[in-house]
Amino acid sequence: MFQVRIHGRGGQGVVSAAEMLSVAAFLEDKHAQAVPSFGSERMGAPVVAFCRIDDKEVRLREPVLEPDTLIIQDPTLFSAIDVFAGLSATGYVLVNTGRTIEELGITEAVKGLPPGHVRCVPATELALKFVKRPVPNAALLGALAAVTGVIKMESVAKAIETKFPGKIGEANINAAEAAYESAQTH
């Protein structure tokens, strides 16, 4: 089973990201489950969502405590909560930022991960460019497809189109494809 934990803030599309990721997995005939987790439900409050992907039925219902991948939609959370708790020693980390790991001050937290498993992706910048709104979720799913290979970019695009039909979906797909390309080259 492949488990993803997504950290962000209210309004960044954390829950929608988990939903779209599970739809992308379904499109590839995999079993998936998206689970939101809310604290205080207000704009800007920390939010966590989870997604599990497997070749067989997913029966677990609890939060993902030992993720294979972390998606950090807001790097200001590094100083607020321990986003790295339980991360697999072979896990992946995708951070929404144009800064480096050193600039973020998380070098120690990710030092034991395999080469290429930690990527900084300017997802908000890409969202602003294509979607005209600071919602990094779709772009980060494109990066997830590039870095982990657990889902295909084509499936991500179809899942985005299902969630956001029309021009909004097209713009989000463009952001996801740009993030996919960026994550492949870094």
Image (spheres, rainbow, N blue to C red):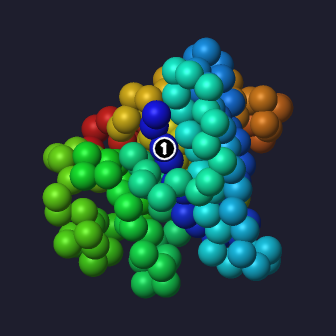
Asked whether, in this view, residue 106 is left or right of residue 38, the answer is left
Q: Residues within 10 Å of mark 1 (few under 14, many from 20)?
A: many
Q: Is residue 165 left or right of residue 49?
A: right
* Residue located 36% across and 37% down the image: 147
Q: What is the quadrant of residue 122 in the picture?
A: bottom left
Residue assigned mark 1: 3
Residue 41 lies left or right of residue 106; in this view the side is right
Q: Residue at x 18, y 47 (%)?
A: 114
Q: Nearer the viewer, residue 161 or 33?
A: 33
Which element type, helix, strand or loop, lies under badge 1? strand
Q: Between residues 137 and 42, which one lies in front from this camera angle? A: 42
Q: Label 1 amino acid? A: Gln
For the question of whether residue 174 can be seen, the reply is no
| Above or below 32: residue 75 | below
Residue 57 image offset from top left, x and y in percent: 62, 26
In this view, 59 is above or below 122: above
Q: Residue furthest bottom?
A: 79
Question: Compared with residue 23, is residue 51 higher up or lower down, i.e. above or below?
Answer: below
- Evaluate whether residue 49 shows in this view: yes
Where does residue 102 sit, x and y in percent of width and height? 22, 72
In the image, residue 165 above or below residue 55: below
State the residue lying farthest toward the front. Answer: 59
Say which residue appears at 39% left-offset and 28% top-offset: 149
In the rendering, at what x and y percent does residue 65 appear?
Answer: 48, 58
